[in-house]
Image (tube, helix red, strand yellow):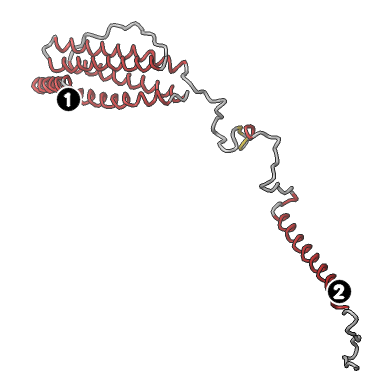
């Protein structure tokens, strides 16, 4: 039976395989290679766009690329330091531990507190000799408190195995012309003691001894209160009448008596 075909098309029989079917594997392979080449070229162009001026592309995250430069030697803006914290010294170069300056100041502060105790006692004697028993009692209580501070610092130093050397105590001032002069001396004493404690705290901060700074915190608070208290009393006494002077003396005596019972 003769089949009818379109003009120009080759005839085919059932027994002969089609040329179109036989070419399909080759066509698939061709399009597959073209697809891969196209996407590979696109990916390469994208990577090149991430690396301007023809610079080398960095290694992918999963690739270990050792550097010849140690991170400890990396500099930022021309200054040496860590790549993460350029302005923080590395632990190997930091000074950790009590410095000679801090140890000397702590040792000296024990004697300073004892010296302050004697100064308060001398003021107490001066007021007692003039029958101003209230101010005398207040000064005596402060003398005991300063001595207690010295013992606290001594105990702290010995627990931490810090060397302590007691220094000779000079005789405190014992003569004044008026009550305001006595209080002026005491105020100057407290102000100097504040500076001494701040110097110890600074030395401790420099060498990283934060436990010493924490120990000194209550002393700093007490110094603020002491300077405020003495400064307030001095302001009231200066130019005060005899009546007001005796009223202040009585009030300080009551305060000292209350403190002694706590």
Which label is found at residue 236?
1
Quarter in which the N terminus is drawn: bottom right
Does residue 50 sit above or below 166 in this rendering? below
Image location of residue 23, percent across then percent down: 86, 74
The foreground one among 46 and 31 is: 31
- Would residue 239 be visible to someone looking at this image? no
Q: Secondary structure at mark 1?
A: helix
Quarter in which the C terminus is drawn: top left
The foreground one among 235 and 171 is: 171
Image location of residue 56, percent across then percent down: 74, 47
Mark 2 surroundings: few (<14), some (14-19) or many (≥20) residues within 10 A: few
* Horizontal side of residue 1 vs 176, given as left or right: right
Image location of residue 151, percent across then percent down: 31, 14
Location of residue 210 by image quarter: top left
Residue corresponding to mark 2:
23
Mark 1 surroundings: few (<14), some (14-19) or many (≥20) residues within 10 A: some
Q: CA distance from mark 1 to mark 2?
A: 115 Å
Q: Residue at x 19, y 18 (%)?
A: 180
* Horizontal side of residue 204 vs 78, given as left or right: left
- Would residue 22 be visible to someone looking at this image? yes
Q: Nearer the viewer, mark 1 or mark 2?
A: 2
* Horizontal side of residue 137 vs 8, given as left or right: left
Q: Residue at x 32, y 19 (%)?
A: 193
Does residue 14 sit above or below 184 in this rendering? below
Image location of residue 155, percent across then percent down: 34, 15
Location of residue 109 by image quarter: top left
Q: Secondary structure at mark 2?
A: helix
Residue furthest to the left: 243
* Among the two numbered marks 1 and 2 on one chain, the one whose residue lies closer to the N terminus: 2
The answer to whether marks 1 and 2 mark residues whose Cβ atoms lie closer than 8 Å is no
């Amino acid at each position: 039976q003769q089949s009818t075909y379109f003009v120009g098309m080759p005839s085919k029989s059932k027994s002969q395989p089609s040329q179109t079917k036989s070419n399909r594997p080759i066509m698939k392979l061709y399009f597959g290679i073209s697809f891969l080449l196209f996407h590979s070229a696109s990916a390469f162009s994208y990577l090149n766009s991430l690396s301007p001026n023809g610079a080398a592309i960095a290694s992918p995250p999963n690739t270990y690329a050792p550097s010849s430069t140690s991170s400890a030697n990396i500099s930022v803006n021309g200054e040496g330091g860590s790549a993460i914290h350029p302005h923080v010294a590395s632990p190997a170069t930091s000074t950790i531990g009590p410095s000679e300056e801090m140890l000397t100041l702590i040792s000296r502060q024990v004697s300073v507190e004892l010296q302050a105790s004697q100064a308060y006692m001398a003021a107490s004697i001066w007021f007692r000799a003039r029958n101003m028993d209230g101010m005398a009692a207040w000064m005596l209580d402060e003398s005991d408190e300063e001595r207690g501070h010295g013992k606290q610092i001594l105990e702290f130093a010995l627990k931490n195995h810090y060397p302590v050397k007691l220094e000779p105590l000079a005789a405190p001032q014992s003569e004044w012309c008026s009550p305001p002069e006595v209080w002026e001396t005491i105020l100057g004493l407290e102000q100097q003691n504040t500076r001494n404690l701040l110097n110890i705290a600074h030395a401790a901060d420099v060498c990283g001894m934060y436990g010493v700074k924490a120990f000194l915190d209550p002393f700093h608070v007490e110094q603020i209160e002491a300077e405020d208290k003495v400064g307030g009393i001095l302001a009231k006494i200066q130019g005060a009448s005899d009546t007001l002077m005796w009223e202040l003396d009585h009030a300080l005596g009551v305060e000292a008596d209350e403190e002694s019972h706590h």
